[in-house]
Amino acid sequence: MKKARVVFAGTPDFALASLKALISAGVTPLTVLTQPDRRAGRGKKMTPSPVKTFSNTHEISVWQPHSLTSADVIAKLAALAPDLVIVSAYGLLLPQEFLDVPRRGCLNVHASLLPRWRGAAPIQAAILSGDDETGVSLMRMEAGLDTGAVFQRSSLAIGPDESAGELYDRLATLGGEVLVENLAAILDGAMTATPQDEAAATHASKIKKSDAVLRWDQPATDLHRLIRAYDPVPGARFEFRGEDIKCWRAGLAEGEHQKAGKILSVDKGGIVVACGDGSLRLTQLQRPGRGRVTAAEFASQFDLQDDCF
């Protein structure tokens, strides 16, 4: 596997886990493709992706095309004569001309058990839907969105209170492990990819900020999942006394049926709020321009008795 001619395409920390696993296994990519630098942080400074930063440190050449459709990009890739292009959370569409260049095609490290949760936000979708498990799929890429045949799947259980950020980290690590374990067989052509069952396919749409609004007339179980699914991005939120409050942690609670949004109790354990069905105990909140605090500390800043969110 050390002689494999591999190109890697990825951008965020999720992809970086697979790149690091490759390097540790003795497979150094011929080059790395990653998204162009973006403005980030309060100063809006141009910031390289985690994959670019790591690649520069390890003296791996980096390409940052804005699109993969140009003839120059295709020719540049063809000149490398890669056996395989490995893609993980790259963020750009791969046209058929690009997919056709590598001898063994393009391999995607996808964060779901395909065909469940194709699309942009599979980790969040798994939590929102109350799935007991998710995992990573190694998929042969084709023109359709995550529709290619699958070489391997590896699953893990989703914790009852696990956030998307926590699950993201575990899946990133799993992705690197599954990639390295199966790479040699895929490169040798010794592993067969199985077509996906189209009838079982589900789609994970791109997240919008409006998706993360807490509506107290919804069931507490749904709101609990929403809070977990949108931690850390974009953060579940609700409006209270003219402020946009983010809720980062919560749990299901006991409580008599009341009007949705009614604050039922406030103590060191959190703020219990009535929902459309059941109650939710908020345990970590954040006011605009401030840090995350316990619900008890948040409550000390307001008189919440007999109030509603």
Image (spheres, rainbow, N blue to C red):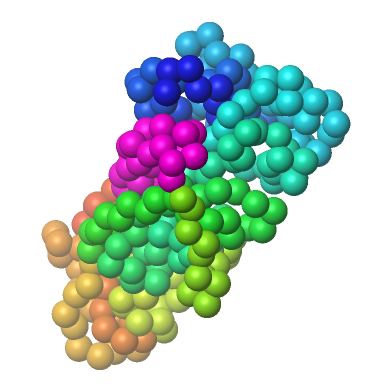
Is any part of residue 77 visible from this angle?
yes
Residue 189 painted magenta: yes
Vertical side of 270 occupied by 64: above or below: above
Front one among 76 and 173: 76
167 relative position to 269: left or right: right
- Provide the major secondary structure of the magenta segment: helix
Q: Quadrant of residue 279?
A: bottom left
Q: Position of residue 288 (x, y in %)?
A: 47, 49
Residue 266 painted magenta: no
Q: Quadrant of residue 217?
A: bottom left
Q: Residue at x 58, y 63 (%)?
A: 205
Quadrant of image for the C terminus: bottom left
Q: In the image as oriented, which residue stretches furthest toward the right? A: 71
Q: Position of residue 140 (x, y in %)?
A: 55, 48
Q: Residue at x 69, y 46 (%)?
A: 93
Vertical side of 47 occupied by 139: above or below: below
Q: Residue at x 33, y 69 (%)?
A: 131
Front one among 143 and 57: 143
Q: Quadrant of residue 180?
A: top left
Quadrant of image for the N terminus: top left
Front one among 14 and 75: 75
Vertical side of 305 occupied by 108: above or below: above
61 relative position to 94: left or right: left
Q: Which residues are drawn in magenta?
A: 163-191
